[in-house]
Amino acid sequence: MTASAPEIQARPADAPAARPASGSRGCCWAVLRRLVGSSTPLWQRCIVVLVLYACTIFIFAAIFKELELPTERAAAEAYEGDLASLREAVLSLTNSTSKRAELLGFVRRIQDFAEKTAAAPSLDNPNWDFGGSVFFAMTLTSTIGYGTFAPQTPGGKAATVVLGTVGIVVTGLVLAVLGEAWSLCIGRAAKGCTRARKDESEQLRTRRDATAHCWAAALLGVAMLLIGAALLHATEGWDYGDALYATWVTASTVGFGDFAPSPRGAMAYIIIIASLALFAAIVDALTTCVAAFSDSPEDQGDEPREHEEAAHAGMASTAGHRA
């Protein structure tokens, strides 16, 4: 009894030292799994991933701003100097007032086109201010890649590779959770449009539910495209057809760049996130529908026959052993 007393006292003393060692392993992953795990309510997971995505984008934007903005300002000052020299050279070509006005108008049109396509650096509206850097970080992590402007410094290019890799993983997590929310909405809409039948088989019920889910996803996708196009039409001033085209290019992450939203338009950010998540949900619905119709009824109908034949063969062999 006296020998066991020190052992009993030593165990509580050693236990606190062992708990922090085991609890410190994978602490961040454990917290993340708890916040976005399937046991957490979906609306809470949506909030968590949106906050995580916003923090990621803002941090990336601050890094890109520090790396690219000084170089862009220097390029903008050099660009303004080149334009002034070009105007002086144009004015020296002729003494005619009308000819000078015509040549200066031509130079102005070239300048407007360069600034419209974000190809020319500007001191008044730089591409790499915080708003523009946020826009670039979103197009980078979502793999849209409009291409309206890109990093020019070695540090910015290196940050694009490193941060882009991390950001794509974070965006995948965000789209997975938001896509689940969209899928839930689509499933409820499909369930409200269909009615179960008592006499139908499990296969027919699965196909009917998959078809209704696919139609609901398609209708919701069309509604999202129309609403997104209307918002871009109002905020960007594009023709509605061009806005509809740009919304699809954004949702599908094709990102040609011929129609890119303004980096300082908050509506573009909402359209990017919502359309990407919905597009993922639509692809999931189409995949589910194709999988439901991939198994032929003949193959499924042969399975009971095979089981029945195997059962008869087993009964016959059992009877033979008994005999």
Image: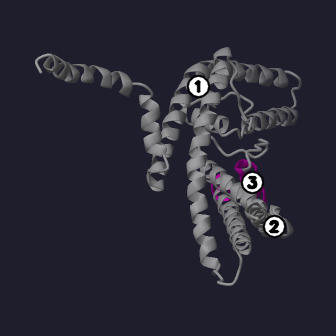
* Mark 3: secondary structure: helix
Q: Can residue 5 be seen in this view?
A: yes
* Mark 2: secondary structure: helix
Indicate which disc residue 64 carries. 1
Q: Which of 190 and 235 is in front in this view?
A: 190
User: How much space separates mark 2 and mark 3, taking CA atoms?
Assistant: 53 Å
Residue at horizontal 52%, vertical 34%? 56
- Inspect the image, locate mark 3, and give the three-letter code of the amino acid beneath it: Trp
Q: Position of residue 175 (x, y in %)?
A: 60, 47
Q: Is the magenta stretch mostly helix, strand or loop?
A: helix
Q: In this view, does 133 lie above or below 274?
A: above
Q: Residues within 10 Å of mark 1 (few under 14, many from 20)?
A: many
Q: Which label sits in the foreground, 2 or 3? A: 2
Q: Position of residue 145 (x, y in %)?
A: 72, 37
Q: Nearer the viewer, residue 289 or 91?
A: 289
Residue 246 part of the magenta segment: yes
Q: Which label sits in the foreground, 1 or 2? A: 2
Please state, as top left, top right, bottom left or bottom right, where the N terminus lies in the image: top left
Pointer 2 and pointer 3: residues touching (CB < 8 Å)?
A: no
- The residue identified by callout 2 is 309
Q: Give the range drawn in magenta.
A: 232-251
Q: In this view, does 206 lie above or below 240?
A: below
Q: Which of marks 3 and 1 is nearer the N terminus?
A: 1
Q: Is residue 90 above or below residue 169?
A: above
Pointer 1 and pointer 2: residues touching (CB < 8 Å)?
A: no
Q: Residue furthest front?
A: 323
Q: Which colour scheme is used?
A: one colour
